[in-house]
Amino acid sequence: MRTNLTLLLLLTCITGAYAQPDDRIAKTPKVNYDWQPGFVSITELTGAIGLGRIDDGLSGYYYGLTTVAGYQFARNIKAGGGLGVHVHEEATLFPVYLDIRYSFNAQEIVPFLAGAGGIMLDFTNIADNTRIFINPSIGLKYVAANRKSVSFSTGLMVTTGGPNARKSFINFRLGLELKSKK
């Protein structure tokens, strides 16, 4: 009897989920295209201010450029791999990372959550300055035209590795997102 009731409840939940309309109507064609799956390229200018102890040459600030090549799987989810360059006071680090983004349902101005994590390489001193990092962030994206949008986000960059261990930054990113044609 319990098995039958459990199956009936499961069937009711699945039926309810599939009965929901998924054909939302966008206010403009540019927003409608932004909802479509496909290849996406996100290039961002980034800058950060060190938090906590900042007397080390890799902890005061950084600025740089990153780019992500990824795929938008659904209206709300994007993921991809990224490369970049971060210039610190004493060294230049090259991040190689994974990036995932969740966009909330909206029209032209879209709030989103993002998470990035990977490794930052210092080719002049691989043993001491190479770091592992995570970077959760929150931001807004403005859908400017078909297949083009501009984003601004802020987050907490935490790095670890090397002789001086963990470093934290509050970072700001201004980005341009381009989507492929269908």
Image: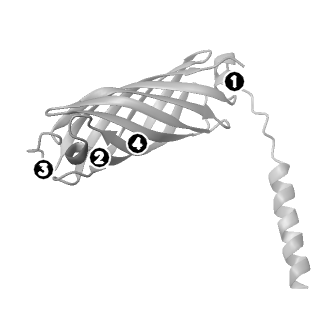
Marked residue nearer the N-terminal end (4 or 1): 1
- In the image, which disc is placed on residue 137? 4
User: Comparing marks 1 and 3, which lies closer to the viewer?
Assistant: 3
Dot 1: what SS? Answer: helix
State the residue at coordinates (61%, 18%): 147
Q: Distance between the residues labelled 1 and 2?
A: 40 Å
Residue under numbered circle 3: 53
> Amino acid under label 4?
Ser
Marks 1 and 3 close (CB-CB < 8 Å): no
- Is residue 129 or residue 98 the one in the foreground? 129
User: Comparing marks 4 and 3, which lies closer to the viewer?
Assistant: 3
Give the class, few, some or many, for how many residues have Cα within 10 Å of label 1's Cα (few <14, many ≥20).
some
Dot 2: what SS? Answer: strand
Residue 46: x %, y % from top left: 32, 29
Give the class, few, some or many, for how many residues have Cα within 10 Å of label 2's Cα (few <14, many ≥20).
many
Q: Eyeballing the image, is 182 above or below 123?
A: above
- Is residue 124 or residue 119 the one in the foreground? 124
